Image: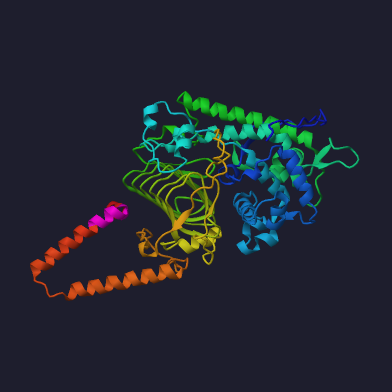
């Protein structure tokens, strides 16, 4: 793609009050950058402005300005699966909860389609390159890597040893402030191009005079939001002096795109300076009391660390050889990140917007109901149980995913020996939480994983020729005979009248039959043992042997981790 910025000349009135209010700050919306990037090479354009302008013209023939997957597949010359994946992903990162694509049932996606302006912005940011992980101060600490069982391990090890770190320290993720600065710089660099895609030419004034309507400006909410030092959310139209206090019954007067460009650049520059000042304060040992960002690379690996960021992100870090529980009363419409947890059981039994599981191993992680998207990355030997609209699995090994998902599970990166299975648990508030975030229990596409490339083009790494087009290893379905229910201890004092008493996702016939057969076999064995004509000493020996075998099974299966919760109660 081109990194050039199209020149724009401001023609704003020099006497107009276009200076930003000093207290207003601009923030990138994290969701499109964290959950909205797809490793599809055809979506990364050499000249994105030209390509997307042509796409916009081709698709704008529809009066409704909404695009279904068939039209999108034809316009981009991609498969219908990839076109539908774009709509699914876009719906999970949209900024407007009132957009019909957000609330649509999966079977209605094509008839409703995506707003063309949101779609164009979504496609534009596919050129974004993520911030590289921080380098490690001690090269010896990165020597403990995954076993080289993949054909691509040699390539990835040469490219970035950090991708394979499996020591007791967490992979060195950039801090939230570092990521925000990186995303702000990206927006600053590409702002003129982004505005040009939302603007319209002035009739009779030539192509260089572009105007931006209030509706077009509000679609910037897909990428940015404003705040001031006194409140978290400032509506876009109220933050901008061009549209503030507009009469809702009268259409606002369009503004020259160059004027909006200049104003936004000032705000971005001030916001970058603010982020830099926060980082400087941290490094000097005097963090601001209002700054709840987490210096991720400094987290202690041996102790649990939980905290809430200013943007409603809750972090669970460093849980080791123990259990950890969070319920709805602890989390209010939050996004959750579970990072660097090992040999533990993590319960997050709450309605969530987004969830990320990163760098965990030998753990069981249960997520309540996630209304938007879940991303599981760089995990090894982890059992993940989740109810969500969608899930993306990246660079994981020997993990089992028990899924209740409304969209196809997406698998990307260098994965190995993954298994998927139907959802296998419940807790008393589960259905209430699912209803709150919009998950449909009648739709479960757990068994339809969609595997994409081994290499993610959004990583800022150079890759050997030929590897980028390789497809990742998909996931196998768990053997029904290995499927078991997962029991969540009841921490809820009083159950609501309409409490969940069973798994809300219907089990497929094979798994249901296996479950019933195992239950029947267990009952028969219990009856045989009760009726066995054994002397008391023989009964004690039998009981002791059963306990030993059961203990061995707990350790071999990993179910010993479930007892941590009971021991902690």
Residue 234 is inside the magenta segment: no
Horizontal and vertical percent position of residue 8: 78, 31
271 in relation to 536, above or below: above
Residue 561 is inside the magenta segment: yes
Instruction: Give the residue at the far top of this rendering.
Output: 284
Locate the N terminus by quadrant. top right
Q: Residue at x 58, y 33 (%)?
A: 182
Q: Residue at x 69, y 49 (%)?
A: 119
Question: 349 and 37: which one is in front?
Answer: 37
Q: Which quadrant of the structure image shows residue 429?
A: bottom left
Horizontal and vertical percent position of residue 127: 64, 39
Q: Is residue 296 left or right of residue 179?
A: left
Locate the C terminus by quadrant. bottom left
Residue 431 visible from this viewpoint? yes
What segment carries the magenta color? Answer: 551-562
Q: Which quadrant of the structure image shows residue 98?
A: bottom right
Horizontal and vertical percent position of residue 293: 50, 36
User: What colour scheme governs how the chains and residues are painted in the rendered image of this protein?
Assistant: rainbow
Question: 316 and 400: which one is in front?
Answer: 400
What count of labels does the image hold? 0
Magenta stretch mostly in which secondary structure?
Answer: helix
310 in relation to 113, above or below: above
Residue 247 visible from this viewpoint? no
Question: 509 and 453: which one is in front?
Answer: 453
63 in relation to 183, above or below: below
Horizontal and vertical percent position of residue 473: 48, 49
Question: 232 and 187: which one is in front?
Answer: 187
Q: Residue at x 47, y 23 (%)?
A: 284
Instruction: Give the residue at the far right of this rendering.
Output: 204
510 in relation to 418, above or below: below
């Amino acid at each position: 793609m081109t990194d050039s910025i199209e020149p724009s000349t401001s023609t704003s009135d020099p006497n107009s009050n276009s200076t930003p209010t000093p207290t207003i700050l601009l923030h990138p919306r994290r969701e499109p950058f964290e959950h909205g990037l797809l490793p599809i090479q055809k979506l990364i354009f050499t000249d994105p402005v030209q390509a997307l302008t042509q796409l916009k013209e081709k698709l704008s023939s529809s009066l409704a300005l909404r695009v279904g997957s068939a039209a999108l597949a034809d316009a981009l010359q991609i498969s219908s699966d990839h076109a539908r994946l774009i709509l699914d992903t876009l719906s999970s990162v949209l900024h407007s909860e009132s957009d019909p694509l957000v609330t649509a049932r999966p079977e209605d996606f094509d008839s409703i389609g995506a707003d063309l302006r949101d779609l164009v912005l979504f496609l534009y940011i596919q050129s974004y390159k993520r911030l590289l992980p921080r380098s490690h101060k001690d090269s010896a600490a990165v020597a403990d890597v995954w076993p080289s069982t993949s054909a691509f391990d040699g390539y990835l090890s040469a490219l970035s040893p950090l991708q394979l770190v499996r020591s007791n320290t967490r992979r060195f993720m950039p801090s939230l402030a570092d990521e925000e600065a990186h995303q702000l710089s990206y927006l600053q660099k590409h702002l003129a191009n982004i505005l040009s895609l939302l603007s319209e030419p002035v009739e009779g004034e030539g192509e260089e005079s572009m105007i931006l309507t209030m509706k077009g400006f509000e679609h910037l909410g897909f990428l940015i939001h404003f705040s001031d030092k006194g409140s978290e959310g400032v509506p876009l139209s109220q933050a901008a002096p061009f549209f503030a206090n507009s009469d809702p019954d009268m259409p606002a007067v369009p503004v020259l795109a160059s004027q909006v460009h200049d104003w936004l650049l000032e705000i971005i520059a001030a916001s970058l300076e603010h982020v830099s000042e926060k980082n400087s304060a941290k490094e000097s040992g005097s963090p601001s009391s209002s700054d709840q960002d987490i210096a991720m690379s400094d987290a202690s690996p041996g102790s649990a660390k939980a905290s809430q960021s200013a943007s409603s992100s809750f972090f669970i870090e460093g849980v080791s050889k123990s259990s950890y529980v969070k319920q709805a009363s602890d989390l209010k419409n939050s996004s959750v990140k579970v990072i660097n947890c090992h040999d533990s059981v993590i319960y997050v039994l709450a309605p969530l917007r987004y969830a990320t599981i990163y760098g965990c191993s030998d753990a069981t992680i249960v997520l309540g109901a996630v209304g938007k998207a879940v991303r599981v990355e760089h995990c090894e030997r982890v059992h993940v149980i989740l109810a969500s609209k969608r899930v993306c699995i990246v660079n994981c090994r020997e993990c089992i995913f028990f899924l209740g998902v409304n969209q196809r599970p997406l698998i990307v990166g260098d994965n190995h020996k993954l298994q998927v299975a139907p959802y296998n648990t419940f807790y008393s508030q589960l259905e209430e939480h699912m209803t709150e975030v919009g998950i449909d229990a009648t739709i479960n596409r757990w068994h339809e994983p969609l595997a994409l490339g081994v290499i993610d083009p959004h990583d800022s790494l150079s890759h050997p020729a030929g590897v980028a087009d390789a497809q990742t290893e998909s996931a196998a379905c768990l053997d029904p005979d290995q499927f078991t229910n997962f029991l969540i201890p009841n921490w809820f004092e009083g159950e609501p009248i309409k409490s969940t008493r069973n798994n809300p996702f219907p089990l497929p016939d094979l798994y249901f039959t296996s479950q019933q057969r195992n239950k029947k076999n267990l009952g028969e064995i219990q009856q045989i043992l009760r009726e066995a004509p054994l002397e008391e000493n023989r009964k004690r020996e039998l009981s002791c042997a059963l306990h030993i075998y059961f203990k061995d099974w707990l350790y071999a299966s990993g179910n010993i981790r479930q007892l941590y919760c009971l021991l902690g109660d």
